[in-house]
């Protein structure tokens, strides 16, 4: 399951099966085009 969780102050986290694959709070930025998809594919390949 892919889930986007809104956070405080405009941050958001992208989780896949409860695995955090992107966090604006941690990076201090929005993802670039294709970044979330790339991380999702890498996670899927390791399962």
Image (cartoon, rainbow, N blue to C red):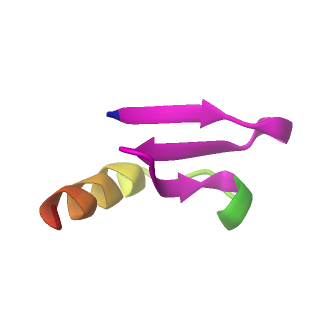
Tell me: residue 43, above or below residue 37: below
Q: Name the residue located 37 percent from the left edge and 45 percent from the top edge.
A: 16
**In this image, 1 relative to 29: left or right?**
left
Q: Which residues are magenta?
A: 2-24
Quadrant of the rendered image containing residue 46: bottom left
Residue 11 colored in magenta in the image: yes
- Image quarter (top left, top right, bottom left or bottom right) of the N terminus: top left
Residue at image location 36% in from the left, 44% down from the top: 17
Observer-nearest residue: 30 or 17?
17
Decide: is 31 above or below 45. Answer: above
Q: Using the image, determine if residue 42 lies above or below residue 14.
A: below
39 within the magenta span: no
Q: Residue at x 49, y 55 (%)?
A: 20
Q: Can residue 6 be seen from the camera position used here? A: yes
Q: Quadrant of the C terminus?
A: bottom left
The mark tally for this picture is 0
Residue 25 % position (x, y) = 73, 56
Q: Residue at x 66, y 65 (%)?
A: 27
Q: Quadrant of residue 38?
A: bottom left
Residue situated furthest front in the rendering:
18
Res 28 seen here:
no
User: Where does residue 12 sit, x and y in percent of width and height?
Assistant: 65, 41
Relative to 27, does residue 24 appear above or below in the rendering? above
Q: Main secondary structure of the magenta part?
A: strand
């Amino acid at each position: 399951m892919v889930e986007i969780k809104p956070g405080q102050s405009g941050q958001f986290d992208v989780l896949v099966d409860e695995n955090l694959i992107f966090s604006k709070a941690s990076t201090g930025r929005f993802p670039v085009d294709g970044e979330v998809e790339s991380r999702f594919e890498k996670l899927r390949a390791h399962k």
